[in-house]
Image (cartoon, rainbow, N blue to C red):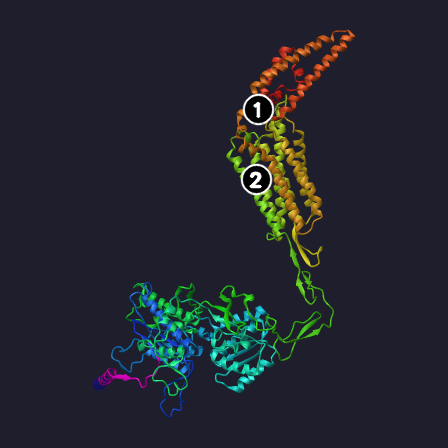
Amino acid sequence: MWSLLQTNLLLFILLYSCFFSAVASSLFHSSCQLQRQFHLNGMHKSGDVILGGLFQVHFFSSVADLSFTSQPHNLSFVRFYDLGFRHAQTMAFAIDEINRSSNLLPNVTLGYTLYDNCINLGIGFRAALSLASGQEEHFILDDTCVGNTPVLGIVGDSPSAHSIAISSILGLYRVPMVSYFSTCSCLSDRQKYPSFFRTIPSDAFQVRAMIQILKHFGWTWAGLLVTDDDYGLHAARSLQSELSLSGEGCLAYSEVLPWDKDTDELRRIVNVMKTSRARVVIVFAHESVMINLMEEVVRQNVTGLQWMASEAWTAAAVLQTSHLMPYLGGTLGIAIRHGEIPGLREFLLKIHPTLHYNNSYGNSMFWEFTFQCKFSPVPSGWLEDGGAVCTGKEDLEKVDTEFLDISSLRPEYNVYKAVYALAHSLDDMLRCKPGRGPFTGDSCATLQSLEPWQLVYYLERVNFSTSFGDQVSFDENGDVVPIYDVMNWLWLPDGSTKVQNVGEIKGSAFRGEELILDEDKIFWNFNSKKPPRSVCSESCPPGTHMVRRKGEPKCCFDCIPYSFECTSCPEDFWSNPKRDHCVPKKTEFLSYHEPLGICLAATSLLGTFICAVVLGIFIYHRTTPIVRANNSELSFQLLLSLKLCFLCSLLFIGRPRLWTCQLRHAAFGISFVLCVSCILVKTMVVLAVFKVSKPGGGASLKWFGVTQQRGTVLFLTSIQAAICTAWLVFSSPFPHKNSQYHNDKIIFECAVGSSVCFAVLLGYIGVLAFLSFLIAFLVRNLPDSFNEAKLITFSMLIFCAVWVAFVPVYVSSTGNRADAVEVFAILASSFGLLFTLFGPKCYIILMRPEMNTKKAIITCRKLNKNIYNTFNQIYCTLKKLYTFLINIRNKHVWISIQRFTLNIHWRTNSIQSVATVLQMQRHSVQVRRVKKQNETHFLKTQHLCGFQTTTLASPMIGPPQRLCSWIQTE
């Protein structure tokens, strides 16, 4: 039983399958036919890949009444739109230019199918469906459709309402659509319109651009007029939202303009404009709607308004007539970015009505429109009314028409960019390498199996530059980088009009909207020739405050006198001249941006650079006698400390902060103590070296070896570091806002915290400087060919003079002047030490190298020996003679001899004094050598004269080696 049931069931399934297959087979191989073909006017050109286009070639169209009682009739055109026809020709030119290019889409020929949408949504929608599905009446459904290849992408449509309707359908099949004129911000919604792109900025940016202009001229009270479509209604919502968020202004009224010529509604709207206090009127509308509005404005003679135009009618030549310019003159408008298309004019001049029909739709109508003639057969009554007959031989180049004026291409430039965006995307797709593609399995698209959704992927990532230099790319919403030109309608004295560019506004992700205006070029259609005043309520005068009017926008208020007394401003604020609100006080400090701060900082860096140069010279010549003879290690330490002195002055420039206040005085104190300590040790070393040349003075030099020198400098600097540490710990300097000297100004300064610590810091530097000066002064006449005592004396004199003068000037200065005084004192004293101590040495090293040799220092040795022996013999002879004469008791002879002897003593002392003074020019390195020679001379002189050594070393003559310097000088 169960097996029988299974058999019957299988037989039933088999019979059903055979029946279904037969029926399905008969249906699959059948053909289908279009129920009705749309009668559309367009231009066609075959190619490997077809691009579609939707353009407004006719201004209006009259559609039969759709009562559904009879078949709809064909359309009747009202007026030819030559600029729309130029848009279509621009796309044809761009495709022709791409086909001639060897770099873009090589071996691929682009074709096009362009339809006239007659600025009618129904016609535009039919045209888009025809582009997506084709116009073939008969389709074979077995394998693939036979007929013209459907378009790969569409350029258009122009109105936002058309693009919204068309893109919502084409987006389901991911057919890319690139609009050149649809600006509605709603089209940026990628969820609703996933395959929509545009080469014109959205209204969201245009609205913000309008607000920037309102803000620039201080217009806080304006009226708004929009068309009754998606373009106008979305613009109105965006403008109201942006004004509410920014708080830059309010709308006096917001009216919707009718599409048809509704006289009553237009009269009411114009009457609202006439009675409102708003002098600025913002209009988001198409030029056809503006024509109806302006007729009513002229009828009611409404003047004195400042019009602001959206990009839809900014460049509308139909409104720039002598009849309307008294009302529209001075209009400010947002215009599409203009561009240049080389070769377009020559392409347009080739238009002729005898060209092939498929590529010449509109040529005859354009010819008739341009030359105001009719081709045969002419309508009845045309010739009787004086009309001309077109021959086709008319010269298009001799006609003055806007069609051939390519000086300001705006929508055409967007069409041009849209075509090239599709072409570059297709080129990128065809350059894909197999196995590295973005699609499933790393595959690439091919020209034979190309799908529109594959082009969308590449269109989202396209990035190229036009010949005009503009970069074209799309963001995540399909929008381009926004940029608009700001236009002004100029009414010339001869009655002619001109639309001139007076600025631009750019969009940036970082800086927002950037408005650039040339106000000197703007024409204002007012007697004052100045921007109008458009506010709901004027600013309240002093002594009153704002009270918002009930039921009105926040820009409308009344000014009510204050019923209470004035209050004091906060500490960092000051009353404005009108005394109606508090304003921040001005701040003052020694800044890097003011001339004084720049000069001081530059001087500090210059001093640092000179120190580095001098240090480099000393290091390079470190083996020369002049560097070695002047304690090179201390010289290097001194140069490094001077660099720190110059650099610490930078801490006194700039806005005072806690760390700079704490560091500036500590760095200043430690740097200068390090510097003065090096000078003090150098002076003490010079003194110790010359003590060695005296009998019994050798022990003094052992206390000033290299280790002792380093330790002394470190010990003296550590004392200053301890003072600074105690200062920072117990009473640290801090930034202070000083308003004691000026009520309306805040002086930023560094409070010292503890005046005692500051005084101790300066006092310690002064003590070391005074000791260095005193010791250097005492040893200034010591014999040395390169003695530094005089240089140190002079440098310490400059140093002390600067800082003695600093104290009274600093105490009497305030604010940035006090900081400038301290910086000047630091720089002056540092430069004084640098030039006085190292200037002469650098001069000898660089300019007089013959003096920087060992030979020049010791050339006087042999000459000194001979002259010294001669002087010793003379001295011994005179001494013996003096002893002999003492024994003579004759009074008269004694007196004469005594006078002679005194004369001899005087001359001898004079010789000794000259030798002692001039001996200071000898180098200290030769002291030990001369001393050793002198000991030999002492022994010889003792044997020769018969006196003891103490007698020879008596102050009458002094150490014999002092004669060397005198001989060398002579």
What residue is drawn where x is 65% and y is 29%?
780
Residue 221 image position (x, y, % from top left):
59, 75
Check disc 2 and report its element: helix, strand or loop: helix
Q: Taking 393 as reference, is 765 left or right?
A: right
Is any atom of residue 785 visible in this view?
Answer: yes
Quadrant for the N terminus, please: bottom left
Quadrant for the C terminus, please: top right
**First along the sequence among labels 2 and 1:** 2
Q: Residue furthest right?
A: 891
Q: Taking 375 as reference, is 532 left or right?
A: right
Q: What residue range appears in magenta? A: 18-41
Compared to 463, does 286 lie above or below? below
Mark carried by residue 825:
none
Q: Quadrant of residue 130?
A: bottom left
Q: Which residue is mark 1?
A: 926
Magenta-colored stretch includes residue 19: yes
Q: Along the line of sight, which residue is nearer the eye, 362 or 606?
A: 362
Residue 44 image position (x, y, % from top left):
32, 76
Q: Which residue is mark 2?
A: 640
Residue 150 image position (x, y, % from top left):
32, 76
Residue 69 image position (x, y, % from top left):
38, 93
Name the amino acid, label 1. Answer: Gln
Compared to 242, does 829 lie above or below? above
Compared to 803, does 590 lie above or below? below
Magenta-colored stretch includes residue 88: no
Name the amino acid, label 2. Answer: Leu
